[in-house]
Image: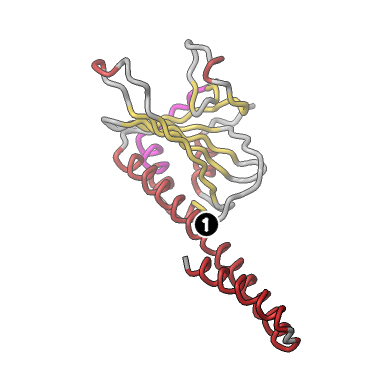
Amino acid sequence: MVVEIVLLKIQFIIPKLQKDNHPKLNLALMNFTQKTFFYIAIFTFGLSLFVLSSCKEKELQAMQKIIKDSEKIELFLIKNTPINPTEQDSSKTYLCDYEVFEKISISSEQSDSLKTALLDTTNYISDVEKKCMMMPKYAMRMKTKKDTLDIVFSDNPCAKAVAKNSLLKTPKKEEEKKKENMFYVDLTAENTIIKLIQSFVPKKE
């Protein structure tokens, strides 16, 4: 609102001064206008970053609440190309539309250590969006009484994750459309989540 008022005043003053032919005032006004637009651009950019950061913070908080309330974590290896939901094989398992080709057995202690890493906020970047291709290799599934949370992880070319939260259907609501929410999460280069996963995956001989 303040920005709009300033712009309206500038649009009103410029033609008037140009008509009255005040060279010094015109030059001063031009400088003022340039500076005003410069500061408006900075303000707008800063505001957009703040909004983006706030949205990601809320997504992370929602995701971490499910993680905290979940039971044992399931760990999988997945193919790195997503499959369109309409083309998925009902006999196979998919997490965030990526096909599972192997389930990794982990102990309760390993599951707990993964949960601790997932709840560690220093593993995430909330104010920057990485511009790199998503090439996931690993996936996790966590369940509570009402929710299920699937997360797929990519470590190359950079650390990213996609999380998908689905409201579990009850027998009485089988006809209802499943509510889903998918969002991207950026991870720090030094995150402990992927390092833990890699330590739990058996090495191929």
Residue in the foreground of this view, choosing between 84 and 24: 24
Q: Residue at x 49, y 52 (%)?
A: 123
Identity of the residue drawn at 34% across and 39% down: 66
Q: Which residue is mark 1?
A: 127
Identify which residue is drawn at 56% across, 43% down: 160
Residue found at x 29% / y 40%: 69
Looking at the picture, how far across and down is residue 115, in whole percent?
A: 38, 42
| Numbered disc 1: secondary structure | loop
Mark 1 is surrounded, within 10 Å at the Cα level, by few (under 14), some (14 to 19) or many (20 or more) other residues, namely some
Q: What is the number of callouts on the image?
A: 1
Q: Position of residue 182 (x, y in %)?
A: 47, 35
Q: Nearer the viewer, residue 151 or 184?
A: 184
Q: Could you tell whether 4 is left or right of 171 in the image?
A: right
Where does the magenta region start and end? Answer: 102-114
Q: Residue furthest left?
A: 172
Indicate how the structure is coloured in the image: secondary structure
Magenta-span inclusion, residue 5: no
Where does the image place residue 197, in percent across and percent down from the top left? Answer: 51, 38
Can you name the residue that lies furthest to the bottom here?
24
Q: Is residue 17 above or below residue 145?
A: below
In this picture, residue 175 sits left or right of residue 55: left
Magenta stretch: includes residue 109: yes
Q: Which residue type carries mark 1? A: Asp
Lateral position of residue 24 relative to residue 142, left or right: right
Q: Quadrant of residue 30?
A: bottom right
Say above or below: 130 vs 75. Answer: below
| Residue 205 percent location from the top left of the image | 64, 27
